[in-house]
Amino acid sequence: MLDTTQGALNNAFQTVLFRRQHTQDKEEMDRLLAEKRGIELVDTLETQVAELIKIENPSEIFDREKLKERVTAYLPPSSSFDFGVWAYYPWLNKIVHLLDEDAFIKVRTSRNIYKITPEEIAVLRRKKVGVIGLSVGQSIAITLAMERTCGELRLADFDSVELSNMNRIRVGVQDLGQNKVIVAARQIAELDPYIKVVCYTDGIHTANMDRFLLEGGKLDMLVEECDGIDIKIISRLKAREHGIPVIMDTNDKGMLDVERFDLQPARPVLHGRLKRIEGMATQEVEQQLKNLSLEQKIEYLVDIIGFENVSDAMKISLQYMRKTIIGWPQLASAVALGGAMVTDVTRRVFLDKFKDSGRYFVDLEELIHNTKVD
């Protein structure tokens, strides 16, 4: 039986799928509609079927009547109400009528072809991606889901949405106070209820890190976008131990890090930039990173990124940290770029089209600038 208590609804992020061809699903959906008043039914199934028919017959010309006849023939003669899948969104109080999974994915990804071939879409459907940190990571997770670069996403962040987050996180004012993971998971479910989303609303720590990386099948890619220096480093040590590649967008100067621990299991983390921890066991590193001061965190951050790779605006910001500003500056444009870069490279890694490790820059100020001096 569905839990429709207010506490459960506040934390809900998964759809409930009803296939009414199955007696139990039909009874469950009918019971839900009878017991929970005010649920809105959204039914655009005929339009979805029409799209599917056109996609499956690309050379055929359809006028309105011909297409309507084909849609009627495609749907069962008894009742189209029981055809396909009804997806219940408890936080929206809506049930939406959809094509079943294979047909839904076929239509939703049809505009990817042939930038991504049907065979590649099938490969990507089996991939698992974990995202730690849902500020910069939200744009990445949504873009991964939109392009359908994977079939499963594991999202981790303990933090909730604050008003100051809304300069770069795509949320509404109604989401203030909600856990960032729950908000992102709901957006993904509203986009595609067939993508599996696993939520870690208490964030990642040493007690659950192996579970995040391995439970339900080993991750194919770890996207690391957390603020904590300790988790930033330890997650890489664990990923290397399990042969999981790691990718990170730094959100400054378009800097992207790729570490192919799947191909290079002995590769030093963060391209060998942390000499102070080389050769140390993970537990030793964890102990060393506990209770770092702000100054020490900045020292580690400079080691990781390199002061030469920090933009002038970011250098100024670091000087004013805890003086006139209280957090790292991040812009929506840079966050959106990060979502695009991480998704593109992750897809190419999964399709065996990109095998390198390294540090790469898509610095828009460097690429697009004034060529004439006034």
Image: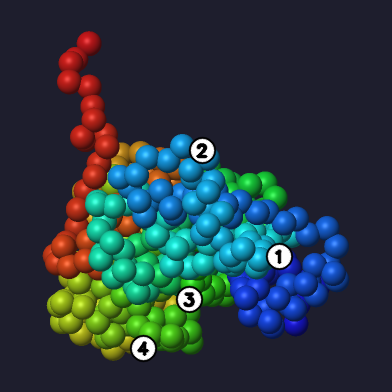
**Quarter-wise, where is residue 366 in the image?**
top left
What residue type is disc 3 on?
Answer: Ile
Q: Nearer the viewer, mark 1 or mark 4?
A: 1
In the rendered image, which quarter is residue 185 located in?
bottom right
Dots 4 and 3: beta carbons under 8 Å?
Answer: no
Determine the residue positioned at 21% across, 34% down: 367
Q: Is 42 positioned to the left or the right of 301 in the image?
A: right
Q: Disc 1 or 4, which lies upstream in sequence?
A: 1
**CB within 8 Å, label 2 to label 1:** no
Please give the residue where the numbered disc 2 appears in the rendered image: 64
Residue 129 shows in the view: no
Disc 1 crowd rating (10 Å Cα; few below 14, some 14-19, many 20+) is many
Give the residue pinned by disc 1. Answer: 90
Measured as percent of width and height from the top left, residue 104 is found at 47, 61
| Residue depicted at 52% across the width and 40% down the height | 65
Q: Residue at x 18, y 16 (%)?
A: 372
Q: Which residue is mark 4?
A: 283
